[in-house]
Image: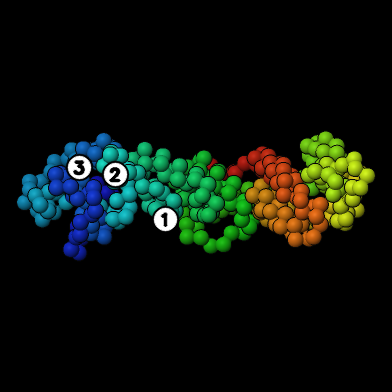
Amino acid sequence: MEQIVSQISTTTPTCAPSPFDHPEADIILQSSDSVNFRVFKLFLSLASPVFETMFKLPQPAVGANEDTKDSLPVVPVQENSKTLDTFLRFCYPSTLAEDPSLENLADIKAILGAARKYSLDLIERKVCQALANPKVLEAEPLRCFAIARNARLKHETITAARYTLRQPLIPAWFAEINMITASDLLALLTYHKKCSITVAPLLLNLDWVTSHYGSSNGCNWLVSGGSLGGTFGFGSDRGDSKPCPCPRNTKAKFRLWRNTPLSWWVTYMEETFELLKDTPSGGIVKSEAEKTIRKVRSGGCAICSAQVKANMEEFSDLFALKVEEAIAAIALKTNF
C-alpha cells in the first residue's frame, strides 16, 4: 500500500467536479494537488483488484484519526487531479462518466502508469489503443516509441518505430528520452539505417515500374508526355495532336522500355530517393509527389498540368507501396 497511498496534503483541499462530488459516495480519494474525489468503492473494486484488496483491509473507526471528511475516510494518492479524474472516468459506468479521449502524450503516459499501478487492465488496453492512434503517432512518433518501449508494449513499440522513419535518422531531443536505454536508442537507429538501405535498390532497378504499367502505352504520360488530343496521357489518333513540349531526361538508369521519361519525373525520383536515405517512408514519397504536382502545374505545360495529378497520385501510391513492402522485411531488433 505504500506505493498507492500518499501523505495527506497540508493544502486546503478542493472538490472534484461531477460525477466525483456525489453526496452518497462512500470514500474520498485525495489527489497529490489536494483535490477530493468522492467516489464509490464498488465501482473502483470492480475495475481494479488493487482497490478491491485495499478496501477489504480493516478500516479505522470514524474519528480515530484526522484522515476523514464528512464522516468519510480520505485516502491520499500519488496521482495529480488531472490523472486521477481521467482514470476514474474509465472506472465509472458510461452512464455516469464518458471515457475521456487520450490524444495528449503526457496524459497517455500518466494514465498508463496509473493503469499498471492499480492493475486496471481494461484501461491499459485503451491506452495502448491511444498509443497506436495514427494522429498521435504522426505528431510524436519518438515520444510514442519511448513510452511504449518503457512499458514493454511490443506491438505499440514496433508501430511507433515505423512512424519514426518519417523523421531524420538522428533525432532531436525529446521529453521521454530518459525512459529508454542506450540499447533501445541504438536498436531504433540501426532499424532506421537498415530501412534506408533496403529501399535504395528501388532506384537501381525500375522493373517494378514497367511491371506495373505493362508497356509504354500504359504510362504514355511519362515516356511520351501525352498530347493535346489525348486524355490523361494516353494519346490520340487525331492528326492535329501536339506532343508535350516538356524536356526529356536521357540518363540511362531512368529509361523505361528504352524510352526517355519526362525530366520533371526524373527530378522527382532523384530528390525523393535522396530524402529516403534519411527518412525511408512511404509518406515521404507521397508528400514529394504533391510538391511535384504543384511544380508541374506552375510550369506552364497545358498537357502535363491537365494530367499530372491523376497520374502522379497513381504512381506515388505504387512507389509508396514498394517502399513499405521493403521496410516490412526489416525487424526492430530488441527484446520484449
How far across and down, in percent of the image, does residue 71 sit? 9, 49
Colour approach in the figure: rainbow
Point 14% across, 47% down: residue = 23
Left or right of 159, for residue 198 = right
Q: Amino acid at mark 1?
A: Ala
Left or right of 312, for residue 138 = left
Among the two numbered marks 3 and 2 on one chain, the one whose residue lies closer to the N terminus:
3
How far across and down, in percent of the image, does residue 116 sit? 36, 44
Left or right of 88, for residue 274 = right
User: Which numbered disc covers residue 106?
Assistant: 1
Q: Amino acid at mark 3?
A: Phe
How far apart are the two marked residues, 1 and 3, measured between alpha carbons? 27 Å
Point 36% across, 41% down: residue = 123
Among the two numbered marks 1 and 3 on one chain, the one whose residue lies closer to the N terminus:
3
Left or right of 156, for residue 300 = right
| Residue labelled with disc 2 | 97
How far apart are the two marked residues, 3 and 2, measured between alpha carbons? 13 Å
Q: Is residue 243 visible?
A: yes
Q: Is residue 255 visible?
A: no
Q: Residue furthest right?
A: 239
Q: Nearer the viewer, residue 240 or 189?
A: 240
